[in-house]
Image: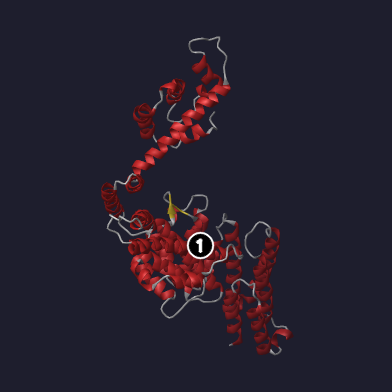
Amino acid sequence: MHKSLLFTLLKTLTSKELTEFHNYYLPLVFKAKHQQVRRLWNYIYETRPFFSSPRLSKKSTCAALFQRNNPDSPISEGRLRQLMAQLTDYIRDYIKWIEYHRIKHRSQHLLFTALTERECHKVAKEVMEKGRATIEAAYSIKSANYHYDMYWYFHDAYFSAILPNNRTGVSLREAIRHLDVYYYIQRLKYSCAVLNNTHILVKNISPINAPLLLQSIQDDVREATPIINIYYHLLAILSNNITENINWDTFLALVYVHLTNALDEYDMELVLVTAINYCIRQLRKGNEEYVKYQLDLYKIMLEHNLLIEDEHLSAQHYKNLVRLAARAREFEWGLYVTEHYKNLVPTSHRQSYYYFNHAVLAFHQKKYEQVLEYLLPIQDLHLLDHINLEMLYIKTYYAIIRQSPQLKIAYLDVLRDKMHAFRLYLLRNERQTQINIQSYKNFLIHLKRLLSFHSHTKVALLNRQVLLQKLRVQIQKTSTLVDKQWLDKQVHLLSL
């Protein structure tokens, strides 16, 4: 019984709703011929609010319903299922009734439709006008949900406008224009989501004709509706339809101006996450200016509590905020996040990511001895971040070799051992990770070649500039390569 649809629905009702169903709704709609259904409900109602009592077994329930007056009467599980199905219908209708009264303007839409069909046009017009006023009062920002509800208002206005006796006062042109607004919002949102997922999954999920959609939206509609304008710019960027007036800078300006008056929490998160993913792709192409853009987007999400769930900040967000701050050289802000948000990180990873963040900040400030001190106590990281930890170790050792000639010999052996161990680690975890292992293998191959220039072999000393230039070309031509810019910078420094 506990796995039935009846109990699934009951467990979604609040205590107040259960009381309302019992005291008001059921007596209002109850049919006299369903007396056994009422007895079943009273029996179940006594086990509220968790409905997990042993009394709710099939045997006990059947005995209470069918053997109450006659202990010798047969127990019918088929009859019990029939009564449960009838009670389930009552619960379903009650949930619909709740929704009908919860959102007034949607109930007014249904009332308008009914009145129009009955040709009560004067009363229907009053209902529709009241519905629009209710919508305007219900929303402080003109979000997608606002336009969705306005869509139903103008849906009603449209069908009234095409009647010979249009008494709503809304012209057909105005109704169509507002219907188009919601259509554009949905098409733009869907197209942005599809293109974003296409880039992440590296496959074409569904064909999107972005240029055609962008061309179909008139400038006056776009400028008059900020949410359309934001998604319009985002889609243009994602689909590489960038112009002098539609570009990353104009998109960011729109986001800053209209973030809180055009986007609800859902759309705000969708826009910001999609934009962050775009920044990540640009950074992979070597466009370092997007570090600051990505950090600014993360700051907006942090400011609006979009990164914090149930008073917890995930270890990944905690790490990403500080990593971007370090790359953007905003060290004070990165240190503030590390200290201020530490206690919001789940306890299982708190200390490790706290030290990891300090190590990242120290690395970008070229405090390499501090980096090693912070990395030492780290024990528990997510698998992907353990790879980042190993990469940080390797780059730190290399930086020490390059900057401290007196430590070169000692750290060359340490670095080679760490690279060998990292290569084995990648091989062991190749099937468990969701990253491109080959990009890290290629990094190790190029770094090994780079290390040869730090030894005193004839190969390293002979035609040094020619060999360095050859290595630099090889790095640039390697399409699957993590930290390509870091490697290129190290080759450049050696050639000076």
* Percent x, y of residue 379: 57, 55
Residue 165 visible to an observer of this rendering: yes
* Percent x, y of residue 435: 62, 63
- For label 1, count other residues whose C-alpha is less than 10 Å away and answer few (under 14), some (14-19) or many (20+): some
Residue 291 visible to an observer of this rendering: no
Quadrant occupied by the N terminus: top right
444 relative to 247 in the view: left or right: right
Residue situated in front as seen by the camera: 170 or 406: 170
The image quadrant that residue 413 belongs to is bottom right
Residue situated in front as seen by the camera: 105 or 306: 105
The image quadrant that residue 81 belongs to is top right
Residue situated in front as seen by the camera: 399 or 2: 2
Count all numbered tags in the image, as a single digit.
1
Question: Where 73 falls versus 102 (above or below)?
Answer: above
Residue situated in front as seen by the camera: 330 or 1: 1
Secondary structure of the residue carrying tag 1 is helix
Q: How is the image coloured?
A: secondary structure
* Percent x, y of residue 386: 59, 60
260 relative to 272 in the view: left or right: left
* Percent x, y of residue 327: 48, 71
Question: Where 121 falls versus 246 (above or below)?
Answer: above
**Residue at x 33%, y 44% (from the top left corner):** 118
Q: Amino acid at mark 1?
A: Ala
Quadrant occupied by the C terminus: bottom right
**Residue at x 67%, y 77% (from the top left corner):** 451
On the image, numbered disc 1 is attached to which residue? 193
Residue closest to the far right: 458
**Residue at x 39%, y 26% (from the top left corner):** 30
The image quadrant that residue 78 belongs to is top right
